[in-house]
Image (spheres, rainbow, N blue to C red):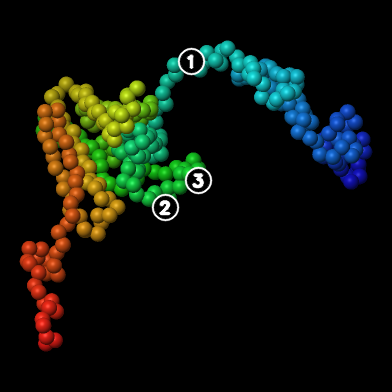
Amino acid sequence: MSGASSGVSKTESCCGPVCGCGPAAPSSPMTMPGAGAPDRREFLGVAGAGLAGVLRGRAASAGAVAGPFSADDLALFPIPADKRLHPSWLRSLRQRGEPAVYRQSNGELYFIGMPIGGICTGQLYLGGDGKLWHWDIFNLPAPDHWRSTQGPHYANPVRPSSPIEQGFAVQCKVGDTFVTRPLDVTGFPQIQFKGQYPIGFVEYRDPALPIQIDLEAFSPFIPGNADDSGLPCVILNYTVKNTSHEEAHVSLGGWLQNPACLGSGASGGVARTNTAIQHARGATLLCSVAAQPAKSETGDSTRPDILFEDFEKPAYDG
């Protein structure tokens, strides 16, 4: 390539001392004729010198958190033991900040899934609107789109989905007005989520309603108590506040589909039973399953079998 056409003279290097298109710098052992490829020590020396120059230049900037460094600091190893962290930056690590708040109005609730539940009791997520989703507690194969070990969820996060129906709703009566709303994105126009693991906070607001509802959801984590921290349970604590000057009658209700034999009961071979148990501190819903009695072709499960032939006669007549 001529100097007129390339704009580079014969004594200049168009790329650098190791590119091969210009004369090598005689002071560099990496580019001496016949030296071949640089070894590890030579490479680290050159890389360390370049990194030191970058860090030394950045150390003077206001955003630097470490340094400055020189080439001697990086001669033996590119990451020095003494990071020379700035005291102001270290102090900032101990300063209490403000938790991030995600709002429905900004479309920020659709990709929230905070793990919730006891330790080693399966995967259950708290959604941005307070609903529980994923429900990987039934020992079933993962859905086709759920390939979390391959890392695609960072590029294409999954949206909340659930194999069962579950949720809560609020009923509010003020004067002659009676309103029922589900506690999710379909029932309230203003919802915000604040995650402080293992606790999640959800606020439900609607200017048209005289009440405010707050959800505090958490796992049974107890320091020093591994047994109770592994209980398969989730605590959902709802608080309702009357913001009007009128008397409000409010009730909360929830629903949960019976998930017993979720993967094997679709064929109709089982009968699911829900039993409500009332006690002094509330109520318990017991979801159970039992084998479904076999039915005859006529649909009558109480008729005894009719013998057609048992082939136990002494002769061969029919």
Q: Which mark is residue 94?
A: 1
Instruction: Give the quarter of the image for residue 43.
Output: top right
Q: Is residue 282 visible?
A: yes
Which of disc 3 and disc 1 is earlier in sequence? 1
Q: Is 18 or 37 nearer to us in this picture?
A: 37
- Whether tag 2 and tag 3 are in contact, CB under 8 A, the answer is no
N-terminal of the pair, mark 2 or mark 1, is 1
Q: Of the residues shown, which amino acid type is indicated by label 2?
A: Asp
Give the structural element (helix, strand or loop) at label 1: helix
Label for residue 144?
2
Mark 1, residues whose alpha carbon is within 10 Å: few (<14), some, or many (≥20)? few
The residue beneath circle 3 is 150
3D distance between C-alphas at marks 1 and 3: 35 Å
Q: Residue at x 76, y 25 (%)?
A: 49
Describe residue 283's horizontal placement relative to residue 119 as left or right.
left
- The quarter holding residue 107 reads top left
Q: Position of residue 119 (x, y in %)?
A: 35, 33
